[in-house]
Image (spheres, grey):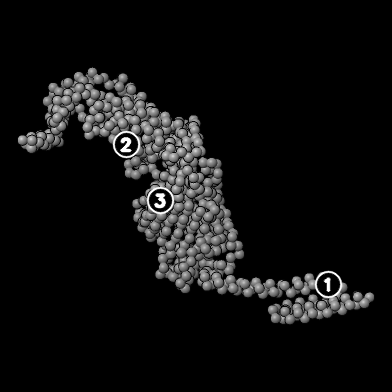
Amino acid sequence: MEENKKFDVNSLIGFVLIGIILFWMLYMNQDPESEQEQTTTEQVEENKTDTLQQNSQTNNLATPTEEASSTENDSIAQLIAQQQLGAFAYAEMAASNKDGVTEISNDVLRLKVSNRGGQIIEAEILEYETYDGKPIYLIKDGNANFSIDLHTKDGKKLATKDLYFEPSLSQEGEDQVLQMKLKASEENYLAFEYRLKPDDYMMDFNIRSQGLNQVLNTSEEPMLHWQIKAYRLAKSISYENQYSEIIFKYEGNKDDYTNQREQTEEEGKDVDWVAFRQHFFSSILLADSPFQRGKFISENLVQDEQVDTVFTKNYKAELALQLEAGEFTKGMNFYYGPTDIKILREYERDLDIAVPLGWGIFGWINKYLFIPFFGFLSGVLPSYGLAIIIMTIVVRIVLSPITYKSYLSQAKMKVLRPEIDELNKKYKDNAMKKQQETMKLYSKTGVSPLSGCIPALLQIPVFYALFRFFPSAFDLRQKGFLWADDLSSYDVIFEWDAYIPLISWVYGNHVSLFPILASVAIFFYMRMTTGQNMQQMSQPGMPNMKVIMYISPLVMLVFFNNYASGLSLYYFISNLITIGIMLVIKKVIIDEDKILAKIEMNKKKPKKKGKFARKMQQIMEQAEEQKRKNQK
């Protein structure tokens, strides 16, 4: 009984003390209404245990302390933010979800936009995969940055990538519209607006501001910084890296690109758009009105092709923005998608320049001849490999008259071979006289040694255009034929993991069959075209064709081992067809006896020399006369 009385007294004393402490704390930290409500705690039941009393005391004392501490921390954080960010401290303090991410997507593209920086932190191309079957990300895991420099009137230079935006996602018809606001106050802000349409790789992107003319220093030019480290997406690192570069259009109709050096920098004025090309996929930033100027930097990240490289290039663009009455008003577009000329042409912004089809006449041949023709063939044939074969056959047939002219010239030179050998023997000690007599022989017989070269030169634009076409044909990507599983990359019949010095660097760690077949075919083709004139071609001052005949197939074998198998397939079929055409010309069309008879007839006819021929003969005669005088 005494113990119970003692317990009741202690409880009473404890509750009284708690009541006094709470009354004092609440009086100092809360308003009168809260104070009145908290005093009712003195009326708790006296039969609570000591443990419950202690817990009650601890809880009632901690709450106001934490609130005071939180208020104090907020004040300190606000003070620090104000010192660092100035007017944009409001955005820092108002951000409720700093790590928040908003996703917008359609059937072909998925994007994620971060509250930090209001920028795209993930861009996935939905309909395609990498060479090893993984999703294609142009942006992911911090490989990209998009930021605008903000110069404030209080002397601060801020970057939007470090500041927090407030997201607002809405639906306008079929379009998804995401607005990201960087606030200086509720009424004053910088807004990034993303508008994504259905089934479109192109997205509207607008920058505008409200009320920032009182915040920004208008004498400082804001710069837009865009940077992407390009992921490796293809099987051959070196091959993909060769076709990865920055392309930009400027000053109306001009375009330029960065080269393949370790690091290169280019500049341009009145920039319409800039493309970060990763061979078959591109990230492009376009402007409704040109950027006043831009600087573009490309850094090669492939230091060792034997290492499983994650990135190929590091791209950077710096673009000058202009304020209008102290405010941002800039309409732009982002494109994340295939470097496919058919898709890029639809936007009518000259984006097909980003496809590496070759310069000048080579690009024209590809754009207006080979691309439409190949598109037609691939649409009606069951295989892209068959489309390449049919296209090659048609090209060779169209060029067969030129091949005939070239071979006819070679046949004439073969018939004249004995007479030329006789002249070489007769004037072996007088090069000038030998040259004069040889030219007279050509003139009398109506044979020109250049007549075989000119047809070959006429074929060069076609050959080079096709050389640029196949590596750039997006339709060939991941399309198989026979043993090749991807006509846009090399085929493999054998490969190894070990690194072999020089061999692995020059040739690679695999064997491709199509380049071997193409090399064998070009060897027999060169043997046919150069073998019969080998002696003539091996004269002093002329290239050694015998050496070239063996070196050319070897160069093709090594050079094309890492190239697109579609290109090697084209060369293999092209050389086979050319060999067949030349056999038909030689066995059926050209009769050497008739050629000889025609040459003999030409000898009997008087030849009227042209003005150029007369001038050349006069020069040679004068040179010979001068030589005789010098000898005397």
Residue 228 lies, in percent from the top left, at 47, 53
Q: Mark 2: few, some, or many residues within 10 Å (few <14, many ≥20)? A: few
Rendered image quadrant of residue 375: top left
- Nearer mark to the viewer, of 3 and 2: 3
Using the rendered image of the protein, determine whether residue 287 is visible from the camera's viewpoint: no
Using the rendered image of the protein, determine whether residue 150 is visible from the camera's viewpoint: yes
Nearer the observer, 237 or 163: 237
**Residue located 24% across and 33% down the image:** 542
Horizontal relation, residue 90 to residue 251: left or right? right
Rendered image quadrant of residue 66: bottom right
* Numbered tag placed on residue 255 in the rendering: none
**Residue located 74% across and 79% down the image:** 35
Residue matched to label 2: 460
Residue 593 lies, in percent from the top left, at 23, 18
Q: Quadrant of the N terminus?
A: bottom right
**Residue located 49% across and 69% down the image:** 211
Does dot 3 land on a helix, a strand or a loop? loop
Nearer the observer, 385 or 432: 432
* Numbered tag placed on residue 50 in the rendering: 1
Residue matched to label 3: 262
Tell me whether the residue at label 2 lies in contact with that at label 1, contact meaning CB atoms closer than 8 angstroms.
no
Q: Residue furthest right?
A: 1
Q: Residue furthest front?
A: 501
Question: Disc 3 to disc 2, how far (Cα)?
Answer: 31 Å
Under mark 3, the amino acid is: Glu
Mark closest to the chain's N terminus, 2 or 1 = 1
Question: Disc 2 to disc 1, how far (Cα)?
Answer: 101 Å
Using the image, determine if residue 103 lies above or below residue 71. Answer: above
Residue 93 lies, in percent from the top left, at 58, 68
